[in-house]
Image (tube, rainbow, N blue to C red):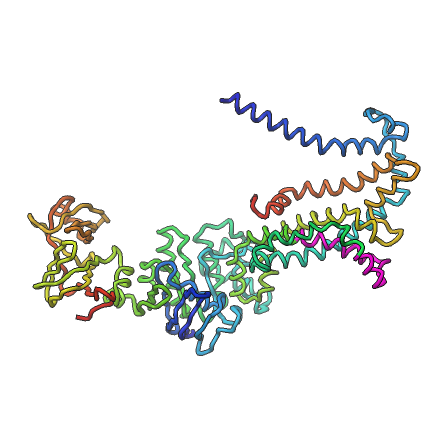
Amino acid sequence: MAEVRFNKVRKQYGSSVIVDDVDIEFPSGSLTVLVGPSGCGKSTSLRMLAGLEEVTSGEITIDGRVVNALEPKDRDVAMVFQNYALYPHLSVLENIAFPLRATKTPRADALHRAQGVADSLGLGALTGRKPKDLSGGQQQRVAIGRAIIRQPSVFLFDEPLSNLDAKLRVETRFELMQIQRRLGITAVYVTHDQEEAMTMSDRMVVMENGRVAQTGPPAEIYARPNSVFVATFVGSPKMNVLGGSVLDQVFHSKGGAIISTAGIASREAVTFGVRPDDLQVSPAASGGGTVVLVELLGPRAILHIDAGSDRLTSVVDADRLGELGQGATVDLRVRVHAEHLFDPTSGFRLDA
Amino acid sequence: MTKGVNALAAARILLLSAAAVVVAFPLLWVAIASLKSPAQLNDPGLILFLPNLENWARVLEAGILNAAGRSAFVATVTVAFSVVAGSMGAYAISAYKAGGSATRFGILAAQVLPPAVLVFPFLTMAYALNINNTYVPIIFAHLSFVLPVITWFLIGFFDAVPRSLEEQARVDGFSRFAAFRLVVLPQVLPGIGAAAIFGFTLSWNDMFYGLILAPPRETILPVAISAFNTFRGVELGAMSAAIIIAVVPVVIASFFIQRRLVQGISGGAVKF
């Protein structure tokens, strides 16, 4: 249980700035996810927290203690890597017990505790095997077992689920959350997958180009993204974002799309955002948009709509596809108060 | 189509057979020669004869096994130092690009130096330090070419160990050296075994430094073999027996490590 803080942390190689004077708070006991596209600085930040990279300037504190100068072994953190980094020459049991060797725990005790951890993760029968004889999911659980056996102050996860197939990813995601909650250990989790970030985090930190774009609970980031970048990064399918103007409650995009709204003030230039779930379509004989593609998801469907020279997506119930199939002409409307307005030059949210 | 493929396969077999003959024939000839009496040696074409062990008796009586033992001692000490220092050096070059990117091959520059350049400075230093009657000078001389080669040989093996493995060990609570010793080294042990045998062979075969720097009257094996070239003539039979003693252990050892040998020499490019 430890609070972690980044105070103006910077990582720079020569003139190339990877992490740009970043301030982040990781509350004690929470699961905070660092999320962002490749190259945004999230992995570098995690590695600085682990002690595997030097901090160029700024301070990283764990429980109030500045750890910049401490070797990884003295920081009381445990880390799970993307490729699990299991020791090939040791068995599953020895892998899990390995960290206890550093604390000079007697071998018998260490192996006994490791067996307990292995059992709790469903690996009890596999303890004699070598890592190469395990499936990806099993290897991942060994890596997790090795991390939890020390009861560290902080858990660090570097894209641990990226090497698993989609179904396994969803299952393991849930297991990880349960373990973190049960143990109550502060966890910092890095991923590029916004869905993982949304479902797992107590707090999300969205990063772009070495800076924090937005911090907060996932629901807040989804409902009130403070920039076009955050708005299009979080949420799937991606938010529809168009430049244009608002006149008489109707948004006209530069490409010719027309979206009806309710209660927006007229504006000359604005960047208009609407999530596919909030873009309402209704069939109309001479509608502004045409459905060009339908992707069936089961109970729902994604409609790809051409409006003017713009391409928009909308998510609708599958039972409406009778009247909204391919080739249908439609009118577009935003659900009440569900639009997002951004400044056309800065990209930041306009609080209307 | 198949005719073309067969011709290619036949050509390949022919080429490999020719190479095998070129390599194996001299050894075979020497082995046969070691079993011939002096009279029979005058007839090189003689293959079917009653084997004669008098050459072997002569060679053992002349103390060839002692010479072999001294060579083995020097080689073992040389290799022991080289493997310990070389593995740490290879790790530094592989993991931390120590010495810059040129070091990977630059370290072999030591091989470019002809032994003739170093041998007299070594001898002079040995006399100055009054250690010319010990094995120290010859061991140092052997280190001068075995250590760089073993270091270079091991770099490829260390390259194959993922960096995340040692990072994991460091986060798990171990110092950098403990991580190297407990996690990285076990992954390269096959390479170290091969490097040890390879280095042993280099030291075992050395004639030049051995001739000049070995303690007086304590000859090493290659020098002992050359001693059969007396002023009365070459004692071919005895020399052949001595050559077999020198060559056979190395051939057998190399057979066992041939995969790792290829891996090491190719800089880790060839993976099995």
Residue lying at 63% horizontally and 52% vertically, measured from the top left: B152
The front one of A97 and B251 is: B251
Nearest to the observer: residue A259 or residue B152 = B152
- Asked which quadrant contains residue B28, the reply is top right
Residue at the image position 21 percent from the left and 57 percent from the top: A240
What range of the chain is rendered magenta? Answer: B121-150
Q: Position of residue A268 (x, y in %)?
A: 13, 65
| In this view, B143 is above or below A9 | above
| Residue A230 image offset from top left, x and y in percent | 28, 63
Name which residue lies at 63% across and 29% down: B15
Magenta-highlighted stretch: main secondary structure?
A: helix
Q: Is residue B155 above or below residue B261?
A: below
**Residue furthest top in the image:** B3
Q: Is residue B163 left or right of residue B206?
A: left
Q: Is residue A90 magenta?
A: no
Q: Quadrant of the C terminus of chain A?
A: bottom left
Specify whether residue A346 is in view.
Answer: yes
Q: Is B26 displayed left or right of A87 in the figure?
A: right
Quadrant placement of the N terminus of chain A: bottom left
Residue A202 appears in view: no
Q: Nearer the viewer, residue A165 or A58?
A: A58
Does B131 lie within the magenta span?
Answer: yes
Nearer to us in this view, A79 or A254: A254
User: Is A27 left, or right, of B129 in this rendering?
Assistant: left
Q: Is residue B226 above or below residue A186?
A: above
- Is B237 on the left-hand or right-hand side of A141? right
